[in-house]
Image (tube, rainbow, N blue to C red):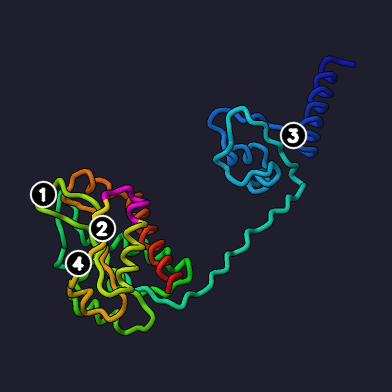
């Protein structure tokens, strides 16, 4: 056998072995910076097949040095689709009132406008409530001015509702901090207490308590109504937290948890 012929035969054998390896299921050792996507491209297999073949649901669990089995290109890995969660529509409607707006900016401290924070949190509350089957009405969806009587009028159009007005606080003394919730009526007090409890638990802020109030937006609303003060933007530390999406997410979740507790009770 000539030297040239021997080299050609060796190349053919190596190609055949590599092809066999891919067809029968090779093993790959994860190198630095590799992801399921980069590995799938290297071996020419879909990412979904690669993950399913290795029984991995979260791609972030991939570790350096981990051994990954490579499915053959011809093998079809059955991926069971996730069943959509069935949401039962709730009987109670929630009126969400982002305080202030438009020409009324609310409290203004350190370049932060209360009206903007109110709307951000309100939208998050709306999204969570809708995902859990609640009908939601927003008194405003954009940066527009709305009178207090108009906000109450919107709530009074519906039956079997609760009204939640969302605000951020401010005080002359910048050391003042914490969350508090105001209410009118007995059912309003229960709703306020439920929301306040969740705010303190989730946000880890000072508990300023639950208080009766005759704020016009509460007094003019015939359904159970509360006004939530989610934190003091006049306090530099609390303002820095209030601006973050993480704090706003937790605030929205706390408000929703309080509403759900009320709904279970009544």
Left/right placement of residue 63 relative to residue 14 reads left
Q: Residue at x 54, y 69 (%)?
A: 87
Q: Quadrant of residue 144?
A: bottom left
Which of labels 1 and 3 is toward the front? Answer: 1
Mark nearer the N terminus (1 vs 2): 1
Q: Secondary structure at mark 4?
A: loop
Which quarter shows the N terminus? top right
- Is 43 in front, or is 122? 122
CA gap, disc 2 to disc 4? Answer: 23 Å
- Is 68 in front, or is 228? 228
Q: Secondary structure at mark 3?
A: strand
Q: Are marks 1 and 2 in contact (CB under 8 Å)?
A: no
- Is 244 in front, or is 8? 244
Residue 195 coordinates in the image, percent (x, y): 34, 62
Residue 90 coordinates in the image, percent (x, y): 47, 75
Disc 1: which residue:
173
Q: Main secondary structure of the magenta part?
A: helix
Disc 4: which residue:
100
CA gap, disc 2 to disc 3? Answer: 62 Å
Which of labels 1 and 4 is toward the front? Answer: 1
Is residue 154 covered in magenta? no
Is 243 placed above or below 114 here?
above
Mark nearer the N terminus (2 vs 3): 3
């Amino acid at each position: 056998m000539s030297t040239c012929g021997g080299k050609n035969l060796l190349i053919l054998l190596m190609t055949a072995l590599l092809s066999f390896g891919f067809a029968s299921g090779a093993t790959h050792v994860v190198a630095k910076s590799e992801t399921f996507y980069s590995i799938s491209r290297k071996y020419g297999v879909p990412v979904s097949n690669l993950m399913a073949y290795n029984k991995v649901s979260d791609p972030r669990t991939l570790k350096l040095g981990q051994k990954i089995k490579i499915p053959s290109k011809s093998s079809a890995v059955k991926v069971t689709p996730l069943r959509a969660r069935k949401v039962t529509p709730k009987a109670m409607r929630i009126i969400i009132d982002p305080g202030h707006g438009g020409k009324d900016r609310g409290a203004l401290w350190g370049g932060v406008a209360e009206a903007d924070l109110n709307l951000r949190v309100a939208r998050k509350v709306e999204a969570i409530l809708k995902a859990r089957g609640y009908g939601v009405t927003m008194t405003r969806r954009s940066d527009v001015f709305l009178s207090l009587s108009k906000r109450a009028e919107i709530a009074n159009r519906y039956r079997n509702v609760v009204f939640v007005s969302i605000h951020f606080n401010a005080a002359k003394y910048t050391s003042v901090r914490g969350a508090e919730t105001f209410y009118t009526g007995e059912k309003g007090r229960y709703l306020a207490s439920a929301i306040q409890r969740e705010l303190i638990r989730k946000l880890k802020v000072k508990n300023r308590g639950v208080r009766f109030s005759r704020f016009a937006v509460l007094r003019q609303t015939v359904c159970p109504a509360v006004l939530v003060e989610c934190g003091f933007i006049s306090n530099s530390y609390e303002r820095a937290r209030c601006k973050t999406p993480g704090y706003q997410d937790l605030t929205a979740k706390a408000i929703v948890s309080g509403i759900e507790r009320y709904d279970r009770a009544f």
